[in-house]
Image: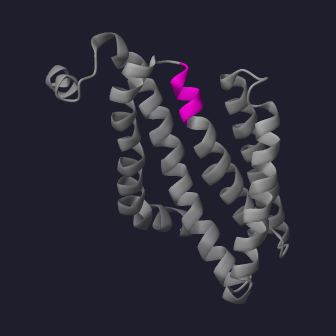
Amino acid sequence: MALSWSRSLNVRRSERPRLAWLYAMLFTSILGCVWGEAVIEAGFLRNVGVKYLPLAIAGSALVSMGSLSVYNLFADRIANHRLLVWILAAGVLGLAAGVLLLAEGSWIAFPLLYVLDSVLIRDLLNVHWPVYVNDFFDTQSAKRVFPVLSSATRLAAIVAGLTMPLLTRALSS
């Protein structure tokens, strides 16, 4: 079945292991992102309020523009896999800071997490992911592989949406 699946998607035998690994990486990260974004946005609206949402969106966009400018300074000087690790490490550190601030009941926790999610996940990771993946494939292969790989984002969103009630029940118990 896997063979007919990969044939119908025009995936070559030599590309399957890399594609499977990258698919799993993307699926897992997007699954966590969708779960996290739902919690962050709901928490922001509940604890900070909808009247501050325009400010958060504008502030996040400004921080994003600055972050992308900094990314641009280093993008061609650092190996793609190292840059991906740095982006993910910054995300983990920011998430840890946000969780600590939440534990202390700080009002800044959800705005920080909102900006962190917007800048590191939606923007920097979305900009860098195709650059990272492109290291593994030549141009012709990438044209075939990217659409297949991109389906991981939609599959992760479906799984996240369908499992959200289970996750909510498990975490609220």
Instruction: State the residue in front, 130 or 17.
Output: 130
Identify the residue shown where x is 59% and y is 59%: 36
Residue situated furthest top in the rendering = 14
Residue 19: where, in percent of width, then height? 40, 24
Instruction: State the residue in front, 156 or 132.
Output: 132
Quadrant location, the N terminus: top left
Identify the residue shown where x is 57% and y is 36%: 129
Q: Is residue 8 left or right of residue 50?
A: left
Q: Quadrant of residue 49?
A: bottom right
Instruction: State the residue in front, 169 or 55.
Output: 55
Identify the residue shown where x is 67% and y is 25%: 80
Residue 121: where, in percent of width, then height? 63, 50
Examine the structure image and report whether residue 131 is included in the region drawn in magenta: yes
Instruction: State the residue in front, 127 or 149.
Output: 127
Residue 65: where, in percent of width, then height? 76, 55
Residue 32: where, in percent of width, then height? 54, 50
Examine the structure image and report whether residue 128 is included in the region drawn in magenta: no
Q: How many marks?
A: 0
Q: Is residue 87 left or right of residue 125?
A: right
Residue situated furthest bottom in the rendering = 51
Q: Is residue 108 shown above or below 76?
A: below
First to last magenta residue range = 130-135
Q: Main secondary structure of the magenta part?
A: helix
Q: Is residue 130 shown above or below 3?
A: below
Q: Is residue 53 shown above or below 78?
A: below
Identify the residue shown where x is 41% and y is 67%: 165
Q: How is the image coloured?
A: one colour
